[in-house]
Image (cartoon, grey):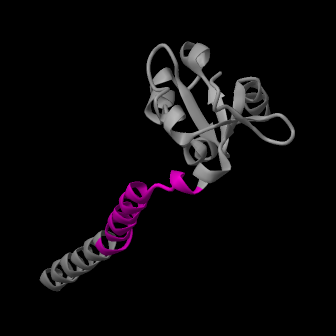
Amino acid sequence: MGENEEKSPDGVRYFRLSEIEEQNTFRSTWIIIHNKVYDVTKFLEEHPGGEEVLREQAGGDATESFEDVGHSTDAREMASAMVIGELHPDDRDKIAKPVETLVTTLKEETSWWSNWLIPALVAAIVTLMYRIYTMDSE
């Protein structure tokens, strides 16, 4: 704990985003979930989803991934034991992910193509083939 350590009025330790980003090694792995900082280093091998998913989020915001998986109450209680502090309020607006937004947009476009256009084309071809087949039979 350095001289620049900041604490909230209720004694919670604040970490700057730059400090957290540095904690993405085998020796020290931190993640952020809902602005709380978790040291998951000792939990990597025990994580039911595998250590890779935690390593992918190391040093950054894992809130969306954590919520998408739908962790149980037990998992949330287990995670609460790993909280070491909170992301500094001044850095909370810095964890937005513009790159992920672009990826999400691309996935949505792909989803539109695969969910609507391709089945519609297949249906049109099947209908056309059926009509040709029934015309030959007459």
> Is residue 103 located in the magenta-colored stretch of the structure?
yes
Q: Is residue 73 toward the left or the right of residue 3 in the image?
A: right
| Vertical comparison of 20 with 113: above or below | above
- What is the quadrant of residue 110 in the picture? bottom left
The image quadrant of residue 13 is top right
Q: Seen from this angle, which residue lies furthest left?
A: 136
- In the image, residue 65 sits, relative to residue 72, either above or below, namely below
> x and y percent of residue 128 in the render?
20, 81
Outermost residue toward the right in this view: 10
Q: Residue at x 85, y 42 (%)?
A: 9
Give me the residue at 21% from left, 83% from top.
Answer: 131
Quadrant of residue 87 in the image? top right
Does the magenta portion include 109? yes
Q: Nearer the viewer, residue 43 or 22?
A: 22
Residue drawn at 44 percent across, 20 percent down: 25
Residue 78: x and y in percent read 75, 24
Per the rendered image, the range of residues in magenta is 93-117
What residue is rendered at 65% in x and 27% in y?
Answer: 3
